[in-house]
Amino acid sequence: MGWKLFFWLVICFPTSIALLATTFYQVLILSDLESDYINPFDASSRINYFVLPEYIVQGALCVLCLFTGHWLMFFLTLPVTCYHIMRYVKREHLIDVTEVFRGLNAERKFRLAKLVMYLILLIVVIFRILAAGSSIFYHNSKFEELDIRFNTLGY
């Protein structure tokens, strides 16, 4: 039972927070670019810095959920992972400095959709942490000998 809590608390929770934070940062940079607070070169270099690590972490989380048998999490992360693989294979994963304004709305909508998906992922992870923690507490309870039902069924 302790491994489930370790998986959700130490592996999935920080990963979900990191994915949510990087996507929020990218949306923030794109909105600053749209408002003309930042120039296109700085915006594209700041966003492109986080793209490949985000793809790697997302893919690793998806594969980890597949190998550990957490099917809900695997099927939640699979569409975004497949979309990341498709964009990487087509070489569309980085933002081009010269064409940043042409695809600004599409990039912002895509990152907002990812932000919502990562928020849903974080909520699921928090519920799984609570479920794993409560199952450890209830299965290792020291109050079993005080329970009348437990004592009568044991004899």
Image (cartoon, helix red, strand yellow):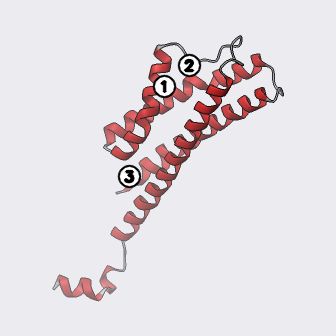
Task: From the viewer's side, name the closer residue of 36 and 136.
Answer: 36
Q: Secondary structure at mark 1?
A: helix
Residue 22: name its quadrant. top right
Q: CA distance from mark 1 to mark 3?
A: 28 Å
Q: Residues within 10 Å of mark 3 (few under 14, many from 20)?
A: some
Residue carrying label 3: 4
Residue carrying label 2: 93
Task: From the viewer's side, name the closer residue of 136 and 71.
Answer: 71
Nearest to viewer (mark 3 / mark 2): 2
Q: Is residue 19 above or below residue 43?
A: below
Q: Which residue is at a point 44% across and 36% down the rendered structure image?
A: 61
Image check: 120 left or right of 149? right
Task: From the viewer's side, name the closer residue of 43 and 154.
Answer: 43
Whether residues under marks 2 and 1 lie with C-beta atoms below 8 angstroms apart, the answer is yes
Q: Which residue is at a point 71% across and 29% down the rendered structure image?
A: 30
Q: Secondary structure at mark 2?
A: loop
Q: Which residue is at a point 45% across and 20% down the rendered structure image?
A: 86
Disc 2 residue type (three-letter): His
**Place of residue 148 in the rendered image (x, y in percent of width and height, measured from the top left):** 28, 89
Lower sequence index among marks 2 and 1: 1
What mark, if any, has residue 84 been given in the picture? 1
Q: Secondary structure at mark 3?
A: helix
Image check: 115 left or right of 147? right
**Place of residue 34 in the rendered image (x, y in percent of width and height, measured from the top left):** 77, 28
The N terminus appears in which quarter of the rendering? bottom left
Q: CA distance from mark 3 to mark 2?
A: 34 Å
